[in-house]
Image: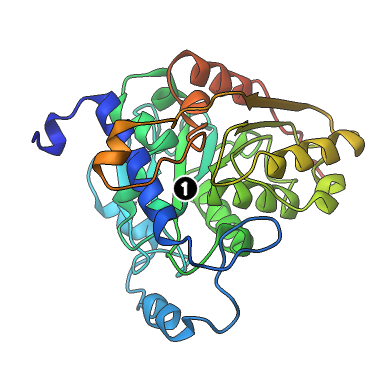
Amino acid sequence: MPCCHELSWAQRVSFGIVTVLVGIALLVRQPLRNNGAFFISPGEDRKIQQETLAYSNPLSADQTLRRMPGVAGKQVAVTRKESEVEELGYLLYLPTSWTSTSTPIPLLVFLHGQGESGSDPSEVKLQGPPAVVENEPEGRVAQSFAVLSPQKTPYTNWHDLSEEVHNLTKHVLQTYSLDRQRVYLTGVSNGGFGAWALGAAHPETFAAMVPICGGGDPDTAARLKDLPVWAFHGENDVVIPVESSDKMVEAMKKAGGVEVKYSRIPDAPGRDDPAWSEAGIPTMPGHASWVLAYYGDPGEQVYQWLLSHKRIISKK
């Protein structure tokens, strides 16, 4: 069996999908909220959560990064022990062109799915924009965006961490002099729910958003109406029903959303994947709709769409 460094880009993407589904399979016994998001009930595993988050913080994230040589052009992992926000470790990627005095660079914030939850931020590289910049360092995405990819623990959910992610985003924007007018948000599965929640909590921060195979609270649509959104969901998704995104898209349209795009994919990737069977994972059709949002020519269109949006900052 080949080692990880011998795997092709396509094989690594497939392996990442398997990892996500393993995480989902481990969570099937957990209770669900009405909107279909995995959650930990109040008090459940509280001791475990407290032990998980009980870290000292001898160095700020900024100090940690600046002590590491060659940050620009590399994706650096910052653990919760080192992070400014104790609940979140993260990956941070800065393009090779970045300097503290260069023209401000756009920031893309990515929220991973349940499968990448844990204490090792490098695991977040398996999917989405972190995988793209890691595997294609000379590509358009790696040269166009700084990428912030927080990592949550398995005992938390993104839709409950909006303030923590927002605080981390503000810290990174300020520390690295990034473009506050071009901050973009995306997330998959659990992170898709998180993207809808964070976008609604702080629509003033983001220029555009791409939530994938997630869902949210339709009552927040009025807060989101000025935020351009391009949602993705597989019609055949057996993990998170497509209706979760349908409801949000419909609510945004009724609220007069400034721009609402929706890719409702009839046969999203995931059907009868032999790699899942070999890993002992039940076939879960349709949940990997992010493959058509982040990679190849379809992904290129999404990144170009994001960059076409710029937020107007009030001078008040």
Image height of 35 relative to 87, above or below: above
Report which quarter residue 41 is drawn in: bottom right
Side of 97 relative to 107 (left or right): left
In this rendering, does residue 44 appear at all? yes
Side of 233 relative to 300 (left or right): right
Side of 208 relative to 147 (left or right): right
Between residue 277 and residue 223, name the one nearer to us. 277
Name which residue lies at 60% across and 56% down.
166
Horizontal and vertical percent position of residue 281: 34, 47
Between residue 48 and residue 84, name the one nearer to us. 48
Name which residue lies at 67% across and 41% down.
206
* Within-10-Å neighbours for mark 1: few <14, some 14–19, many 20+: many
Image height of 78 relative to 41, above or below: above
Secondary structure, mark 1, is loop
Between residue 62 and residue 275, name the one nearer to us. 275
Horizontal and vertical percent position of residue 54: 38, 80
Report which quarter residue 39 is drawn in: bottom right
- Determine which residue is flagged by label 1: 112
Q: How many marks?
A: 1
Q: Residue furthest top?
A: 297
